[in-house]
Image (cartoon, helix red, strand yellow):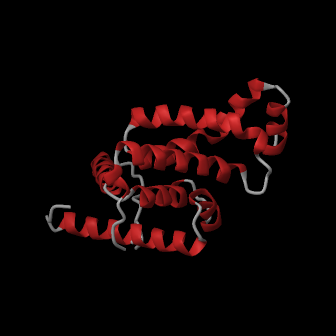
Amino acid sequence: MLSDQDLITKICRGDTRRFGELIDRYEKLVMHIVLRMTGNQQVAEDLSQEIFIKVYDSLHGFRFESKLSTWIGRIAYNSCINYLRKEKPMLLEDLPDGVEIKWMVSTDRPDEFAEHQDQKQHINLLIAKLPAVYRAILTMFHLQEMSYKEIAGVVDMPEGTVKSYLFRARKLLKEQLVASEEGVPT
């Protein structure tokens, strides 16, 4: 497998077939960010295509001052912010403060598996209610396992702000989980 730098060099020199390799490497990152921020599969697919077109058009300007994943993630994040500003301005409102998410473990028992799926679906619904930036940061940290520094590069915020937003997102999610367990509408 080619390094990111070798891959970009080949693409920029005209080997456009290699761009498919770049997409294969980073489509999961882009889809996670876009799907979490927009909450709509069709919109996520359309935006992801647009994002990779932007990546292709801007690839010659990438200087390896950050990781390629950070750069692509930033393009995805900014594209989502632009989409949400245009289409759904209410989703960008900042909500209050974010504590540990307990991810369930898979099981072989069908009844436990069904319960796990219900819990997972419920958590995803609650995450979807979080502000877009919180959803994005949660996704990048927990699903993409990006560092605070990488996330800061993507969302163009100081690391301290990323940590604070992650804390707030977790806290808000925990509050929603507790409220839903107590039967309080979220």
Q: In this rendering, is residue 44 above or below 76?
A: above
Q: Quadrant of residue 4?
A: top right
| Image location (x, y in percent) of residue 183 | 13, 64
Q: In this rendering, is residue 91 above or below 95?
A: above
Residue displayed at 43% across by 49% down:
37
Residue displayed at 30% across by 51% down:
125
Q: In this rendering, is residue 136 above or below 35?
A: below
Left or right placement of residue 81 versus residue 30 in this view: left
| Image location (x, y in percent) of residue 121 | 31, 49
Q: Is residue 1 visible?
A: no
Q: Is residue 48 visible?
A: yes
Q: Nearer the viewer, residue 126 or 134?
A: 134
| Quadrant into which the N terminus falls | top right
Q: Nearer the viewer, residue 110 or 150?
A: 150
| Image location (x, y in percent) of residue 98 | 39, 72
Q: In this rendering, is residue 40 above or below 181?
A: above
Residue displayed at 47% across by 50% down:
81
Residue displayed at 65% across by 53% down:
70
